[in-house]
């Protein structure tokens, strides 16, 4: 150990900016890490902090990477194989991190300490060579294991998708391709929950009823009492009947991209946890619009108010349907078709016809208590009709 190396080690470990510099560099220079969510970025930060401390210790004492370190790196590689992050990208992230570390050490080192510089170079080359070999082996073994048990691999794929454990859409599609599947797109993420005290719905039965051959590979998994299915988007139309026959409740999210499956899952599970009893009308599942309204009411909206208005009102936002918006507003304000007709100076039958058109265009019946509430919220946050 040299005093110079120990001084530099202490400075770097004590400076949180160093770890942030590593994370920022990996985020900027490795495409597979560019779209990490906060949770995955935090994981990268934790790994960087640990690896930084371990490498600096080895450099300080002229030590070699040990069995415990290798076990941890094997575990990291296995996790990256499971979440679909490409191995070249993982190894490049370590090389980028090493370059940042060299710059940080160079900024603090005594220019005359040639021996320390040579030791640093030797330590980096030896460590990176070992890591490449160990992590590549673990990564390949995990990939082979996942591909070997295809049913389990597909369940794990959906588990990782809904947990947000993928760096990018490219990583998702690469992993699906390795398993020989094509993910449904556009998709419906359907989260199903049984009546209180019942067992989770059988994923195989639901998949058989809700999907047609050739529309992408549907995926299914269970999480506690809930069953989660990734299906072709048109499955949303048949879900109410399939679930209603089994006494199940569900929420179908169809408006999110492949990069937001985790967001869709949070919306659906949040909606099922917070929806009032009367929102679960027989023969109907909750939708994106219901989920966004419930998130708004719970105080943690996943979107802006304007999006909620567009989701629920749909064509009613067009100037050509201004008269239908006015009829809906009058009905919501008065609670009576007759009173609404009087306020608009219409015949009651004309007002009822306009309300039927509202129901046809939005899929929501103003007479239903829950759907009336969602329509009321939508017209409130959307503001007055255009034109």
Image: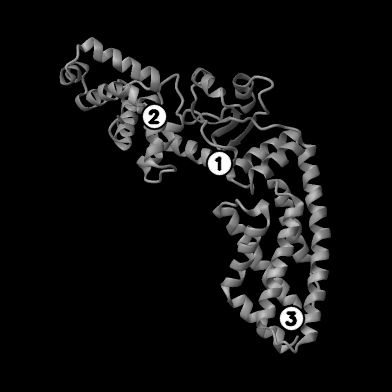
Image quadrant where residue 146 sits: top right
Q: State the residue position of label 2.
A: 312
Query: Residue at image x 45%, y 34%?
Result: 272
Which corner quadrant holds the C terminus? Answer: top left
**Which is nearer the eye, 362 or 141?**
362
Rendering coords of residue 292 (x, y %): 42, 37
Q: Nearer the viewer, mark 3 or mark 2?
A: 2
Q: How busy is the neighbourhood of tag 3: few (under 14 within 10 Å), some, or many (20 plus)?
A: many
Whether residue 140 sits left or right of residue 45 in the image: it is right
**Which is nearer the eye, 114 or 296?**
114
Q: CA distance from mark 3 to mark 2?
A: 62 Å
Earlier in the chain: of badge 1 and badge 3, it is: 3
Query: Residue at image x 22%, y 17%?
Result: 337
Mark 1: secondary structure: helix
Q: Which coloring applies here?
A: one colour
Image quadrant where residue 160 sits: top right
**Which is nearer the eye, 226 or 310?**
310
Query: Residue at image x 70%, y 49%?
Result: 85
Q: State the residue position of label 1.
A: 260
Q: Residue furthest front?
A: 387
Earlier in the chain: of badge 3 and badge 2, it is: 3
Is residue 20 placed above or below 42 in the rendered structure? Answer: below
Whether residue 87 sits left or right of residue 192 in the image: it is right
Q: CA distance from mark 1 to mark 3?
A: 44 Å
Q: How busy is the neighbourhood of tag 2: few (under 14 within 10 Å), some, or many (20 plus)?
A: many
Is residue 37 placed above or below 226 in the rendered structure? Answer: below
Residue 287: mark: none
Whether residue 204 sits left or right of residue 283 in the image: it is right
Residues at discs 1 and 3 in contact (Cβ within 8 Å): no
Mark 2: secondary structure: helix
Residue 60: mark: 3
Q: CA distance from mark 2 to mark 1?
A: 20 Å
């Amino acid at each position: 150990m040299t005093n110079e190396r120990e001084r530099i080690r202490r400075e770097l470990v004590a400076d949180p900016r160093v770890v942030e510099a590593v994370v920022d560099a990996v985020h900027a220079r490795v495409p597979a890490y560019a779209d990490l969510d906060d949770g995955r970025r935090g994981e990268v930060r934790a790994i960087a902090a640990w690896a930084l401390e371990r490498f600096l210790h080895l450099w300080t004492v002229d030590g070699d990477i040990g069995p415990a370190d290798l076990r941890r790196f094997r575990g990291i590689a296995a996790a990256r194989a499971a979440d679909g992050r490409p191995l070249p990208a993982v190894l490049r992230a370590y090389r980028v991190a090493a370059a940042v570390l060299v710059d940080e050490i160079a900024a603090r080192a005594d220019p005359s300490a040639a021996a320390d510089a040579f030791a640093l170079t030797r330590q980096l080359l030896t460590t990176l060579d070992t890591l490449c070999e160990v992590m590549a082996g673990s990564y390949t073994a995990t990939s082979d294991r996942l591909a070997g048990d295809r049913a389990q691999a597909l369940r794990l794929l959906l588990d990782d998708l809904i947990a947000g454990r993928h760096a990018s859409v490219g990583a998702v599609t690469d992993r699906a391709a390795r398993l020989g599947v094509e993910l449904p797109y556009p998709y419906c993420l359907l989260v199903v929950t049984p009546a209180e005290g019942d067992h989770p719905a059988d994923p195989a039965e639901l998949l058989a009823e809700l999907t047609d051959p050739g529309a992408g590979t549907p995926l299914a998994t269970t999480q506690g009492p809930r069953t989660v299915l990734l299906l072709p988007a048109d499955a949303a139309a048949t879900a109410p009947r399939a679930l209603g026959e089994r006494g199940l409740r569900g929420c179908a999210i169809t408006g999110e991209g492949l990069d937001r499956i985790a967001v869709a899952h949070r919306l659906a599970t949040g909606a099922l946890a917070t929806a009032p009893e009367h929102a679960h009308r027989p023969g109907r599942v909750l939708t994106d619009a219901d989920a966004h309204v419930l998130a708004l009411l719970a105080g943690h909206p996943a979107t802006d108010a304007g999006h909620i208005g567009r989701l629920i009102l749909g064509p009613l936002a067009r100037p050509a349907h201004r008269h239908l918006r006015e009829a809906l507003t009058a009905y919501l304000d008065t609670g009576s078709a007759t009173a609404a007709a009087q306020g608009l100076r219409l015949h009651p039958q004309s007002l009822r016809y306009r309300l039927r058109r509202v129901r046809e265009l939005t899929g929501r019946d103003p007479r239903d208590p829950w759907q009336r509430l969602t329509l009321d919220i939508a017209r409130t946050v959307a503001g007055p009709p255009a034109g």
